[in-house]
Amino acid sequence: MLIPQALGSDKFRGTARGFETEGRRRRYLLESQISNGKTSSSASFASRPKSAKCSCMNLHRKRFAGWPLWSLVLLTGCSSSDHAPAGPQDISEVIYVGGTTDEALLRLLDATAKDDPQRLLNLDSPDLAAPVAKDSPATFQFHALSPSTRAPDLRPRQVPQSSRWAHAWHEFVDLVSPERIAHAHGAAFNGTAYYLVFSDADSKQKLQLFTSDTSYLPEANAWQSLATAPQPLTLDITWASFEANDIPQDSGPFVGGKFQFRIE
């Protein structure tokens, strides 16, 4: 095979030597850039510390960081107008007036009383602007503030099967409870009933009344108990409308009001 003469000439050798020199120069520049930290974009990205994060992720985290707190505030505000049951209450000393039953009272205590301004009660007597005389019992009389308060619909209604089982269970519990022995059941209560609780200055309940009347005259011994209790006293009233001892939908219980007074 014949080799062209040009390949062995001095001109060709010079050109090849120039290419070799240029290649060495480029390698030198690349090595210098690497040693000085001026690498390519991919090398630079790989050399970033692990703690460096995308700024957009930090922005999203800051934006959503306050959500749980705002959610808690909203949930708290939605339930602030209702008064949840305070837990099991002793009803062994309750006075029942006007055909009310302990079963109806248990339904009222098991539910959450709604604080509706249109369902508040007004205390007509005694006059709470001055201390109540302790010489003789005073009559507590009240009425609904809003004329929109209406009597319940007493038409027969179909009771779901689940409610029948619940009713049977309550009947069984009442049958074996001490309250059943002390207060025998009569006919189921229908109508509006008011739960009055008198408490002393130490928040101790002194008198409990469950009545269908809108007035109450304490007996002498009950009045004496109130008069000798730490003053001032507080009267809390909760009420509801009942059908066969049950509270229909939108019939309560409602917060009737809290009234403070003194007996002197």
Image: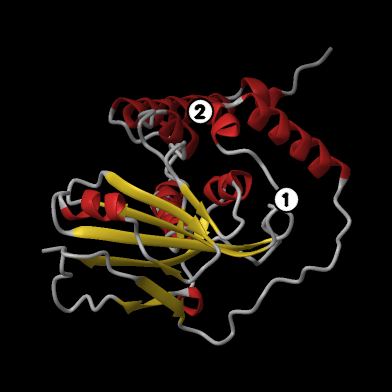
Kindly identify the amino acid type of the residue bearing the numbered disc 2: Gly
User: How far is the residue under mark 2 from the one under mark 1?
Assistant: 124 Å
Image mark count: 2
Colouring convention used in this rendered image of the protein = secondary structure
Residue furthest toward the top? Answer: 1
Q: Is residue 45 left or right of residue 168?
A: left
The x and y percentages for residue 217 are 37, 65
In front: 151, or 9? 151
Q: Which residue is mark 1?
A: 187
Q: Quadrant of the C terminus?
A: bottom left
The x and y percentages for residue 210 are 49, 55
Q: Which residue is mark 2?
A: 14
Q: Residues within 10 Å of mark 2 (few under 14, many from 20)?
A: few
**Residue at 86% of width from left, 60% of height from top?**
157
Q: Is residue 156 above or below residue 13?
A: below
**Residue at 58% of width from left, 63% of height from top?**
240
Mark number, residue 246: none
The x and y percentages for residue 235 are 32, 61
Q: Is residue 118 visible?
A: yes
Residue 120: quadrant of the picture: bottom left
